[in-house]
Image (cartoon, rainbow, N blue to C red):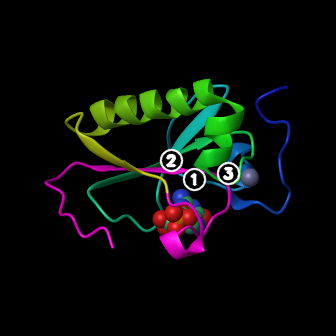
Amino acid sequence: MTATSNQHSDCLFCSIATGKIDADIVKQNDDVIAFRDINPQAEMHVLVVPKRHFGDVVHVAKAEPELLAQLVTFADEVASELADGQFRFIFNCGPNAGQSVFHVHGHVLGGQRLGWTPA
Ligand code: 5GP
Ligand code: ZN
């Protein structure tokens, strides 16, 4: 399967992954793209996204654990390149947990001393 197969035409992050919609891209390879969140919640707020469509991180973990590992590595690289290498990595799973885009994405937050108000 190629990196951009399995796209959903009505999915915002599929459209960013294929270049149909612009984003402030900070890093990408064949499988993963990282771009700045449009509504940043920290000095550094980047979304790390597989280019292929998965609904949430649980689907990635079950179907392709090595891709999940790649997302974590990507987050680490983004945090080192844009900030001091320290970061929080959040996956919201389901609307009650705050998920609003149903194409898996990890929020990489850092670049400052972070607070902790998780709920
Ligand atoms: P969720 O709420 O699903 O965990 O996170 C979705 C994130 O996507 C939010 O933080 C939101 O600000 C971000 N977002 C929504 N639409 C866009 C967009 O068009 N471009 C970018 N770069 N980020 C977006
Ligand atoms: Zn998608």
Amino acid on which the number 1 mark rests in the picture: Ala
Respond yes or no on whether mark 3 lies under 8 Å from ligand 1.
Answer: yes
Amino acid on which the number 2 mark rests in the picture: Phe
Question: Magenta segment range?
Answer: 92-119
Mark 3 and mark 2 in contact (Cβ < 8 Å)?
Answer: yes
Respond yes or no on whether mark 2 lies under 8 Å from ligand 1.
Answer: yes
Name the residue tied to disc 3.
16
Identify the mark at residue 35; answer none if there is no mark.
2
Mark 1 and mark 2 in contact (Cβ < 8 Å)?
Answer: yes
Residue 93 within the magenta-colored segment of the rendering:
yes
- Cα gap from disc 1 to disc 3, whole angstroms: 7 Å
Residue 115 within the magenta-colored segment of the rendering:
yes
Q: In this rendering, would 38 be left or right of 14?
A: left
Determine the residue positioned at 49% across, 69% down: 97
Respond yes or no on whether mark 1 lies under 8 Å from ligand 1.
Answer: yes
Q: Earlier in the sequence, mark 2 or mark 3?
A: 3
Give percent across and percent down for residue 88.
31, 48
Which residue extends farthest front?
Answer: 62
Identify the mark at residue 9; answer none if there is no mark.
none
